[in-house]
Image (cartoon, rainbow, N blue to C red):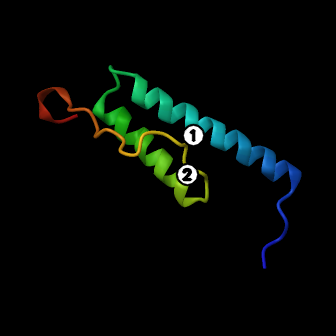
Amino acid sequence: MSAPVTVIEADWRAIADELARALQETMLRNPTLTARDWNRAHAALGRYEDAGGRMPSGPADAPAAPEAPGGTD
């Protein structure tokens, strides 16, 4: 059985949830985001979800990573 969530932990989780939403919105709204930055942000959101964070609600299908100029980044 896990210990009850403390108020401080709940506050940090709320902050982390808000930051995850902001990161996702920034990713989706930034047309100049490089493939490398997209991949880093996407990986960070994946780690956040793996750690038990609530993924931000958004489009059901997130767009694929943008193509890097020249085919690689």
Which residue is identified by label 1?
20
Mark 2: few/some/many CA within 10 Å (<14, 14-19, 20+): some
Task: Tell which residue pokes out farthest to the right in this image.
Answer: 7
Could you tell me how far apart the alpha carbons at marks 1 and 2 are, in whole angstroms?
Answer: 8 Å
Residue 1 is marked as none
Question: Are discs 1 and 2 less than 8 Å apart at CB?
Answer: yes
Q: Secondary structure at mark 2?
A: helix
The secondary element bearing badge 1 is classed as helix
- Across and down, in percent, residue 20 comes to 57, 40
Q: Residue at x 82, y 60 (%)?
A: 5
**Residue topped by disc 2:** 48
Q: Looking at this view, name the residue that lies furthest to the front.
A: 60
Residue at the image position 75 percent from the left and 45 percent from the top:
12
* Residue 49 at x, y percent in the picture: 54, 55
Could you tell me which residue is drawn at 78 percent across and 74 percent down? 2
Kindly indicate the quadrant of the structure image that contains residue 67: top left
**Kind of residue indicated by mark 2:** Tyr
Amino acid under disc 1: Ala
- How busy is the neighbourhood of tag 1: few (under 14 within 10 Å), some, or many (20 plus)? many
73 left or right of 57 in image = left
Q: Left or right: where does residue 54 sit relative to residue 63?
A: right
Where is residue 71 shown, x and y percent of the image? 13, 34
